[in-house]
Image (cartoon, grey):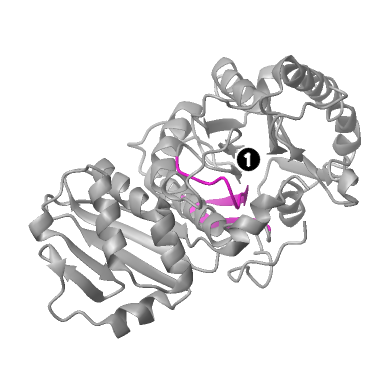
Amino acid sequence: MNLKPSPFAPASFPGLPDVKGVRAATGSRGFYARRGITRDDVFLFAFDEGTSCAGVYTVSHTASADVLWCREALETGGGTARALIANSGNSNAFTGPKGVLKNEATLKALTETLDVPREACFLAATGVIGEPLADPNYVGSFVPDLAAKLAAPDWEAAARAFMTTDTFPKGAGTSLEIEGSGVNIAGIAKGSGMIAPNMATMLSYVFTDAAIAPALLQELLEDITDETFNSITVDGDTSTSDTLMVFATGASGMEPIMSAEDPRFEAFATALHTVCLDLAQLIVKDGEGASKFVTITVEGAVSCQSAKIMACEIANSPLIKTAMAAGDANWGRVVMAVGKSLEPIKMDELSIWFDDVQVAEHGSRAENYSEVEASAVFAKSEFTIRVDAGVGDQSHTVWTCDLTHGYVDINGAYRT
């Protein structure tokens, strides 16, 4: 599939910091060979002993075999990690016993090749749903080749290896000092379509050489996810393979953070939140066929959850998303979306802004409403829709994109 690059694609992949205790390799297993494409489609990461990990996964009732394994491994392994392998081109979802056999063969290859515990190995796959591999050892047999190439991560190569309909590789990172110890964080993500907040709507992996207890890292990741990956949407569809994981090797040399009361915790948490938000927003900016990146904030709600529900109703409305694409500042559709959310509002207090242009106030069109000014906002490539529900003091922000003919073209040809 020859995809037109997103208008938000960066000029180059960002320079991400080195993360101690992590090695990686990529390679081509041939998942795209039938399309006449040769490209890297698998990556392998290996972690030093003592690496902590945390993960959140799709809540879909048709979750892939890989997601089911990762949930089990995270629990049985107590949040420790030694290896991660992922492929694009086939999601290993809804593949029944054959999907389990694929995982068993891959895990056997990882444990034997890397000499690591089975429950410290994590798997991921992304691509077409419902197509079992003819050879269950198709990925496993490739593990020795990848293991022989393990070296300091080439972040861009890894980010490209698990792309599907993405038009650019996605990476984000940061460095900070925590009480004299230099700590690095680097993350990669893939996702472009089938993106809606219901855990993490994509595959994303973040790596750090910070030291933090697994249970604390898990708690932190769940909190961060709600404000980042669970607050993005492209098309309202939740994948069978959604995965977000963080791996903390502890190789920076710092003493482990064991409690949220540790004075070092806040600095690390803020840095991790920044990287996750950057990655999440990159996914929206690469939304299939997207031409606009839109921030939607609902305030004046009775709770953060209520504000989020209303914001998501706006973000996922095909009527609003197509109006965005056409540059039609149809604020009445925002009124519609807020109402159909069935969340508490005061209609006589409801107010709406497009950027700083007020289009509705006190339950009706703004007294100084200007179609010209409102349309000028919708003509921009990036803008904000802000709603005040008039019933409280809580708020939430989500990020979305428009819905263009490009989305239909991409998904109409997804399997061809």
Residue 218 coordinates in the image, percent (x, y): 46, 31
Q: Quadrant of residue 109?
A: top right
Give the residue drawn at x 32%, y 36%: 261
Three-letter code, disc 1: Ala
Numbered-mark total: 1
Judge whether 89 appears above or below 213 on screen: below
Residue position for label 1: 251
* For residue 234, side relative to residue 103 (left or right): left
Judge whether 56 appears above or below 321 on screen: above
- Quarter the N terminus occupies: bottom right
Q: Main secondary structure of the magenta part?
A: strand
Q: Nearer the viewer, residue 344 or 150?
A: 344
Residue 212 coordinates in the image, percent (x, y): 50, 35
Q: Residues within 10 Å of mark 1 (few under 14, many from 20)?
A: some
Q: Quadrant of residue 97?
A: top right
Q: Which residues are magenta?
A: 169-197
Residue 243 coordinates in the image, percent (x, y): 57, 36
